[in-house]
Every structure is written in C-alpha cells, then in structure tokens.
Amino acid sequence: MRFLSILLILLATLSFSFADDNESIHVPLMDLDEDYFSNEYGFRGANWRGKDASDLDADMYPGAGEQERDGSVDYNCNGISGWSKTKGKSNENWLCERAQSRGVVIFGDSAAAAFHIPESFIPKSRNIEDFAKLLNYDHLRKIAQQRRSQRHDRDDDFDVLVHEFDWPHKSWATGFSEDINGESIYMKMRDRNRCNHRDFQNLAVNGAKAKSLIEQVGNFSRDKSDKPSLAFVAYIGNDICKKKLEDMTTVDQYRKQIIDGLTKLDAKIAPGSKVVITGLVDGRILWDTMHDRMHPLGMTYAEVYDLLWDIKGNPCRTWLTSDASMRDKASARAAELSEVALDIAKTAKFNNFEVAYIDLPMKDAIEDWKNQGKDVAELIEVVDGFHPSHTAHRLLSKLIWEKLSTEYPGFLGPLNPNNQMIKKNFGEQGGH
C-alpha cells in the first residue's frame, strides 16, 4: 500500500507539472471514479471539495441529490446513513428531506483560495530579483517541487506543492480547519443544517479573473438532480492588476464574461440555488496599510513594491505603486466593474438560481480590527503584501454572513430542527 501511495504521488507530481501549461486542469488528480471528488486531500482533493466517501462509485459524492434509498450507503457523503423503522424511511430522508440543504461553492481567484506564502520561503539571498520569482505562481510550483523532493518522510507542515500555495480549508467561503473556529460560510451553513456536511467546492485558481468563470463552472461537479447550491462569484482584483492601466478589463468585457459564466452555470446547477456576486476590492487599501511598514526583506513595503516595479516583478503594478494617480485610476475601474456586477444581480434572470450582489467587506474588516485595537497590517499577507491574510478571511466570513443573514436570509436556508438528532446519532459525521 505504501508503494502504491508513493506511485500515485509521483504520477500526480508529473501531471501537476504538466498542468502549469494548461489552465483547465484544476480538478482532483486522484479521482478513480472521475466524479471530481477525492478522498485524498492534495492535488485539488478533499481540502478543495468535500471528501468523497468512496472513490470507486461515481454516484457517491458530496451534494448528491436526495433519493428514496434504503440508507445502506451514504450516497451524499454527509455521514448520515441507516434506516429508521419508526419513520419507515432512511435516516437521510427523514432528517434532511425538509431541510432545504445546499452546498457552498466559490468561483474565484487566489484570494478566494486563501493564498499564502510562508515566510520560510523568502530567499536567503534577500535579493529582490530572487524575491520577485517568489511572487510568480509558476515559479512557486517549481520551488515547491524542489522542497518536496528534499523530504524523506511526511511531516506535519502544510504541503505547499499539492495545494498550489493555497489554503482552501482556511478560506472565508469553504474553510473547515479547526483553527478557523468555524469562521467560514461553509461551516456556518453546516451549523445551520448538519445535512450540509462536506458539501463544499472551492474552484478558485491563482491568477483567475472574470473570464475564468466559464472555465471554473466547467470544473464544477453538480447537475440539476443534485442538491441546490449557495455559490459565490468572487474575482476581486486580477481584472485590475495589469502591467498598465490600458490592459485592465473593460466594463463591456467584464459584463460579457460574467454573464457567459452565469449562463453556463444555469445549465448545470440545481433549481432553487442562489448565487452571490461580490464586488472588487479597492486595492488602495494595500498601499495605505503597508507602504511604510517594514518587509521581512529589511526595507519598507513601498521600497519593495517600487523595486519590483523596476524589474517587472510586481504582482499588481496598477495598485502596488507609489504613483497615487495610477492607484486612483485602478480603483475607479474596480468601482465601475463592481457597478456592473450590481447591475447584473438586479437585472439578469436565470432559470435555476437567484442572484444577489454584496460589496466585499474588506474596509469593514479593517474598521472592525481597528476598533479592537489591533494592527491593520495583520489583515494583509506578510510576504507578498497583497493578499488578505488568514486572519482577514475569518473576519470576511463573519461580515459576509451577517450581510446575507440581514439582507438575503432566504439564501441560507432554514435552521434544520433535526440538527441535535443528527449530532446525537452520527457525531461528527465522519469529519472532513
């Protein structure tokens, strides 16, 4: 068995290398029944999508539709099985049939995937050109492979290779790691209705932008016979982060790309689903928060951003710059695209889902953090000075949930009155 595991990892590593040149390969690599779910955690597996209870049965996966079954098999992988003699039906049917279960899915970018570079990956040379390579997604994959080849035994550290420097199990949308203390939309949906256990999919990809939506919908494992979904469309910055302002996504391009993606989603998602489009972030927050702070390289973030600009290694030249005029113009375009997203939510009609818009509450998160007397810089990733930190993800989860609970409570579904019975009989339902 150990030999087989090693062989699978080697094959996966080779395929992962190939995937660098093919954006569409963002589905679980270790997926024997090809249902897009896996019981392995890495390579787009169970940290990205709920754990598959069986990788040998394509009809058995998280979010599978409720049917009249005898309960002998947990087809939707939520840990509820068996037959109730008193009810005359399977436990799944009587505990969940009126619960309006729905899974959580996010289509998005590296921020949606909780991208994070550990400080241990900062080059020992402290050379700015070496550091610039660290901010290149393809280069990150290469150095991660080198690190992996140096490991002789499995350790407890997060395996950066098989997760592409993403931490989806800590994302504001789909996180389930113990150390997030339940602060994710998925965990809150699970607490609201235990029948939602394991029903999540994080389809975010590093570098993705609005035009990526149609591709990510193609990798979404769902059809109309499955349970409905609560889906988030969250491309918060890459349409703005270009080499120059003229390259930013236009209003017309953005509208078409989002509409095309949602139209494709409508063709496969279950009726009764809900879709939330978030606005783009105002990236001036990054400069305003970080520019005079000291970076681990031993210089201010402003100096790092400008040096990266000089060698064309800056991950967001339109916002991470000392040029205030450029930052303002970038934010103006971001606001325009957010207005388009709002208009789509108000006017576009789809057969199988309702659409809502919310602002990404990063400014609110900052105010919340300030009011607690804490350092705002803790909400921005230390190494790249660009992405929301994992601390920020927990705050975003709280604020987004509050927004939905107040303005769109129907998107969340009702509280399942059978939750305590599920806990009593099935405990942690197999965990994650």
Image (spheres, rainbow, N blue to C red):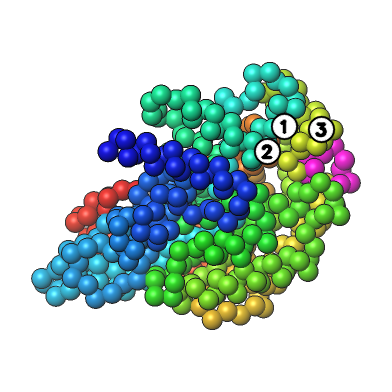
Span shown in magenta: 317-326
Kindly identify which residue carries mark 2: 136
Mark 1 burial class by Cα count in 10 Å: few <14, some 14-19, many 20+: many
Which disc, if any, is residue 311? 3
Q: Is residue 66 above or below residue 61?
A: below
The magenta stretch spans residue 322: yes
Q: Main secondary structure of the magenta part?
A: loop
Mark 3 burial class by Cα count in 10 Å: few <14, some 14-19, many 20+: few
Which disc, if any, is residue 132? 1
Amino acid bearing label 2: Asn
Q: CA distance from mark 3 to mark 2?
A: 13 Å
Q: Mark 3 or mark 1: name the one nearer the start of the chain.
A: 1
Q: Nearer the viewer, residue 148 or 279?
A: 148
Q: Is residue 30 above or below residue 404?
A: above
Q: Nearer the viewer, residue 411 or 308?
A: 308
Residue 190 visible to the viewer:
no
- Mark 3 touches mark 1? (CB < 8 Å): yes
Q: Is residue 256 above or below residue 150?
A: below
Which quarter of the picture shows residue 181? top left
Q: CA distance from mark 3 to mark 1?
A: 8 Å
